[in-house]
Image (cartoon, grey):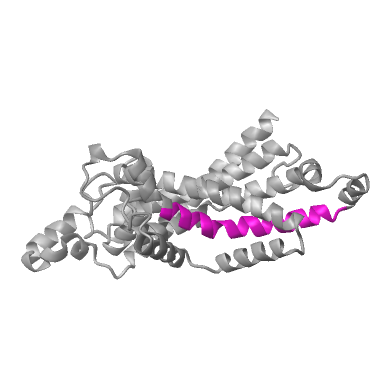
Amino acid sequence: MLRDFGKWIVYNSIKLAALLFAVCAVSFTLVSLSPIDPVQAYIGADMMRVGPEQRQAITAYWGLDRPPLERFGQWLSAVLRGDFGTSMIYRRPVLEVIGERFAASIWLMGAAWTLSGIIGFAAGVVAAMKRGTWIDRAIRWYCYTLASTPTFWMGLLLLTVFAVWLGLFPVGLGVPAGVLAGEVTAGDRLQHMILPALTLSVVGVANIALHTRQKLVDVLGSDYVLFARARGEKGLTLFFRHGLRNVALPAVTLQFASFSELFGGAVLAEQVFSYPGLGQATVEAGLRGDVPLLLGIVLFSAVFVFCGNLAADAIYRTLDPRMKEGKAV
């Protein structure tokens, strides 16, 4: 058992190393081919005041005058030493910016991830148990509609209704405008986080609900469930005895595997609500040519998504010991 776990760790470590190297190479190539001039984006509105000599000095300072392959080798060697460089926008170390922004995003993504998982699983179970009724049709209609709804559109809709028309929540930002950092309370942060988290959770309900419903429908149609019905079992008793374990494992795997969709949705939601998280920093880095920050966020997001998939695999193996690496015993 311990040997299998060690092999599993080594195997996934090699996969992560190969993934990160591929992400580094592809991302650096795409950034190098981008039409955005990082020097011009760095100078901004002062472009007319900067002479050719100053522009050349800025280019040399950031190493943009060297060949792309040489810059990639220097950047990669610095990353291996733990140095991700300095952000051209914030004039601060990249890891410091990522840590600060991720601290804001983790609460948003965590709340949305938890809500979408719980609501989606419960909705899928109810739809399967009430198969063919108006409840089942309503839940499926809701899920099919949301599955094709863009995150930014849902965010704009919630923003218009609950912030502009009803005035129940702030229009945007992560904290009240004009309030000192020391005077911001946890309630203020929570109030500003509700609409972005609701946007992500509402859109994320569809996949887990539809998957859980279909899985439970298959379970309820199996021979052992038909035998249990013949013994008089029904309702919640039937579900908890014969359905919960069979639908919980796939639901857990799907929920953890949705980290990539969650991160991508957070980028759009944070833009709509001007929420100062990692998603907004990603957009700013891309539009303003902040190469060190953009590459750092890309690497961080790759590790984030990989850890989500790895956690799903680990939980699946823990809950169902029969599952090994790629086969059942």
The x and y percentages for residue 245 are 74, 43
Is 288 or 21 nearer to us in this picture? Answer: 288
Quadrant of image for the N terminus = top right
Against 297, residue 138 (above or below) is below
Q: Quadrant of residue 34?
A: bottom left
**Dominant secondary structure (helix, strand or loop) of the stretch shown in magenta:** helix
Is 18 or 170 nearer to us in this picture? Answer: 170
> Residue at image x 64%, y 39%?
315
Against 322, residue 70 (above or below) is below
Residue that lies at the very extreme toward the top in this rendered image: 2
The x and y percentages for residue 223 are 90, 52
Which residues, given as a range, are shown in magenta?
Answer: 195-222
Is residue 66 shown left or right of residue 271?
Answer: left
Answer whether residue 212 is visible to the viewer in this image.
no
Quadrant of image for the C terminus = top right
> Residue at image x 47%, y 54%?
198
The x and y percentages for residue 132 are 77, 64
